[in-house]
Image (cartoon, rainbow, N blue to C red):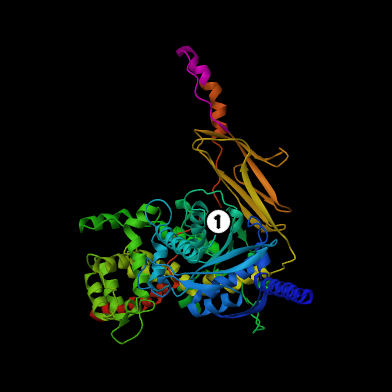
Amino acid sequence: MKKVFACILSFIIAFTALMSFQKGQNVNAAVTGVFDASGMCVEYYYSDSLFAQDSSSYSTPLADISLIASVATESKSTAKSFYAELGFTDIEFNDGYDNTTDSDKIGVMVASKKITIDGITKDLVVMGVRRVNYGIEWADNFNVGKTGNHQGFDNNSKRAFEFLKGYMNDHSIDKENVKIWVQGYSRAGAISYMSARSIVEEKLVKSQNDLYVYTFNAPSGVQDEWDCTCIYNLVNCMDVVNRTAPSKWGFKKYGKIVYLGEPTKVLSLKNPNIDTTEPLYTEDFTVRKLDLQAALGQGGIFGGVADEQYNVISFYAKFYDFMSDDTIPDSVNKSREKHGLDPIPAISDRETYVDYYQDAFMYFFELTYSGAIDTQGSAMGAFSTLLGADTMTTFLTECFEEDQMYVETIASLKSSIVIDTSSSFQLDDAKLLSLLRLIGKAFRMDSGASTMIGLAFADCEMMSTLLGNALYIASAHFYDVVLAWIRYDDSDPYYETNVEFRNELSGDIPTISGESVLKKNFLSVVNCDYDEEKWIFNGWYDENGNILSTDPYYSFTVTRDTTVYADFEEVPEPTVVETEEIAETNESVAPEKEKRSKKKSSSSNNFAIPVIAATLGVAAIASGVAVAVILIKRKKKN
């Protein structure tokens, strides 16, 4: 009997040990492989141990696998295959993943697995927001709204959160014993960091330490402040997408910004694709000015003594100035007023953008991605019907010779565009009109160009430069560039800069910014914005109480993790004095007012208007052709 009992006991011990071993293999998985999809063929490494540390520390390996995971959300099949390789199960997709026939949608995937951290089994839930295959949904990027957070991103971040919350409820996942991993690229990145706030505030995790959020080249979408430690936004400093929506309109991101590299080192980046020996770059992020006069005179669109070069961000700043500056003579708007037309406003503030141009931006992409075709059966793609010589000629004629309401152009477009009968998308006269007005402004056709020659040789220059340099501008947003930066010279450590108040404040407190993650010897910048009528800024201090700078805008080279403290005090209440003491009191207050009126610096990232897609720039070439057609016709008439 003892022998039988001993055998049974041995079997139980052996079975338990075997199950423990198998469990350990499953939950402490380390996976190496090759991701081969979406134009990427790269090696990757994943381990459950990446989630053993608190999310408050930046992790290069977790950033690396998060980027590849975000790329894998391209389609259901790619996502299923990739996440299954990492050990995730119960992979589910929301209704918006495939349904992209509406601009107000988002595609979300959620999956889960068991992991063991310090001997404790937990659920690891991953939420991936689809990064491409947007369809009409992409137009929602321009749905800014007049107040609060970016309306399009905000609405869809709530949808993403609700889908995640429903998944966790359906699978009975313990919110006290779960870790959540969220990642997203570009538009999906904005949805990701905005969803994170709901995840924390609705207590889907025990604390922020259990939420890991990594975004890549995400646009800005929030206006308010949130003290979060779990979000890292990785950006290529030459990428224009991460600079929109405009910081001048108050937009920012939740979490820390991880700046990935210096433009001067771009040629040193190794191509992460393992199936090529080609360098990632043969040129840096340089934009060369298009000079039409030099092109005609010397045979090259970038040739001639007038040739200028900028980096992408410098050009972006010029483009912002171009779109936000009227450059309209009073005589033009007076003429418009005679014809009962509104003045042409600059896109310089959020309210004007929404009132005059938001519908136009959105409609351009709704039409582009609607699946509409022209009467010859070609895909609309870049709004190709507008580029036809007949349509463009009508458009230019109406800009200069009629009432600028584009009646004939709209009729021509409607007769040339075929909408699939199964599609819910419909052509809209008012939105077509707003789109044509936007194009007129972009090419300065109805906003100041007084002659056809002026249009051809000056007003199309900026848009044509955008077209000619589209590759350099767009390439800064490519995911292989971001991956190359993450893997570039990884022996250099990253250091974090944190900003805090030195003393307790209450009420309408100042705004301080500068939370960032940078490699050693990079330049870190901290900044503050405050109401000078309420606050006095005494300076930036280090951890030991030493003053660093009295300038609200302070920069320094990072050599370690650093916390910089902003010191403020309230402006004292004015003292009530007798009449004969007023003069003396004013004299004593003057130096204090002078101290408070030091010039405040604004963020160096204050560029941005959502850049018109490069496809729109194609119209520059067609407009030149149309100009020639009109001039020839007029010459023949004369």
In front here: 42 or 462? 42
**Is 627 a magenta residue?**
no
Which contiguous range is marked in magenta? Answer: 569-585
In front here: 16 or 384? 16
- The three-letter code of the residue at mark 1 reads Val
| Residue extending furthest toward the front | 1
**Is 578 a magenta residue?**
yes
| Residue extending furthest toward the bottom | 376
Please identify the quarter of the rendering in which residue 494 is found: bottom right
Q: Residue 310, how many percent across, how many down?
A: 56, 65
Q: Residue 294, how many percent across, how many down?
A: 49, 74
The residue where tag 1 is placed is 205
Q: For the point 41% across and 51% down, which residue is it?
A: 148
Taking the image as shown, residue 38 lies to the left or right of residue 368, namely: right
Q: Quadrant of the N terminus?
A: bottom right
Q: For the point 54% across and 67% down, which residue is it?
A: 308
In front here: 162 or 564? 162
Please identify the quarter of the rendering in which residue 480 is found: bottom right
Q: Residue 432, how many percent across, how many down?
A: 28, 69
Q: Residue 423, how many percent across, how many down?
A: 29, 77
Relative to residue 437, is residue 549 depicted above or below? above
Q: Quadrant of the C terminus?
A: bottom left
